[in-house]
Image (cartoon, grey):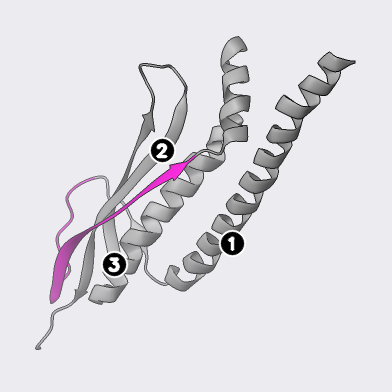
């Protein structure tokens, strides 16, 4: 009986709290991302396979959006369990998705503030920020999006 009480107090209760807090934060983050994506949907973001000529009468500038998104304690716990048997770690997929989408949004918002009406050759890079030496798994993911924005030339 004492073992069961110990198990409940020191493992199940904290994991339930971590799950509830992490889920709430993730839902708020996704709500913010969806709202901001709706505001930036009018800026096309494309990638060309080869060099393309610049459209006439435009200015171009490089923009970068970067973000670091951490995994909550529940996801780290579940991922460590999954590492024991191998396979796809689905709990981290939402962390990577949020990171990529947030980085693209930050890049597009900077370009919109500059006056861009199109973004081309957008690239996304990701890397994990974790404790490699201690083999604790991913603590956070960094996502960076960069691309060239066009706007009509000023003063013409």
Q: Is residue 5 left or right of residue 96?
A: right
Q: Badge 3: few (under 14), some or many (20 or more) residues near its Cα, within 10 Å?
A: some
Residue on which disc 2 sits = 141
Looking at the picture, how far across and down is residue 146, in whole percent?
A: 26, 52
What is the C-alpha distance between the residues marked 1 and 3? Answer: 20 Å
Looking at the picture, how far across and down is residue 125, in whole percent?
A: 32, 40
What is the C-alpha distance between the residues marked 1 and 2? Answer: 20 Å
Q: Is residue 50 left or right of residue 65?
A: left
Viewer-closest of 21 and 116: 21
Which quadrant would the C terminus be assigned to in this image? bottom left
Which residue: 35% across, 60% down?
106
Disc with the residue nearer the chain's start (3 vs 2): 3
The quarter holding residue 149 reads bottom left
Q: Is residue 89 visible?
A: no
What is the C-alpha distance between the residues marked 3 and 2? Answer: 21 Å
Secondary structure of residue under mark 3: helix
- Is residue 10 one of those drawn in magenta? no
Q: Is residue 123 visible?
A: yes
Tell me whether circle 3 and circle 2 mark residues in contact (CB < 8 Å). Answer: no
Q: Badge 1: few (under 14), some or many (20 or more) residues near its Cα, within 10 Å?
A: few
Looking at the picture, how far across and down is residue 131, in whole percent?
A: 39, 24
Q: Which mark is residue 76?
A: none
Helix, strand or loop for the magenta stretch, by majority: strand
Disc with the residue nearer the chain's start (1 vs 2): 1
Q: Find the magenta span and give its range.
A: 50-70
Which residue: 43% across, 54% down?
102
Residue on which disc 1 sits = 31
Which residue: 59% across, 11% down?
84
């Amino acid at each position: 009986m004492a073992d069961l009480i110990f198990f409940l107090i020191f493992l199940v209760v904290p994991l339930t709290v971590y799950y509830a807090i992490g889920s709430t934060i993730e839902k708020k983050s996704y709500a913010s991302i969806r709202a901001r994506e709706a505001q930036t949907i009018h800026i096309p973001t494309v990638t060309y396979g080869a060099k393309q000529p610049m459209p006439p009468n435009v200015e171009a500038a490089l923009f970068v959006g970067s973000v670091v998104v951490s995994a909550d304690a529940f996801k780290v716990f579940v991922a460590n369990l999954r590492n024991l048997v191998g396979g796809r770690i689905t709990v981290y997929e939402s962390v990577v998705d949020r990171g990529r989408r947030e980085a693209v949004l930050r890049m597009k918002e900077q370009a919109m503030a500059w006056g861009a009406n199109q973004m081309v050759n957008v690239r996304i890079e990701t890397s994990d920020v974790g404790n490699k030496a201690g083999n604790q798994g991913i603590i956070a993911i960094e996502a960076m999006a960069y691309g060239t924005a066009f706007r009509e030339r000023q003063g013409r």
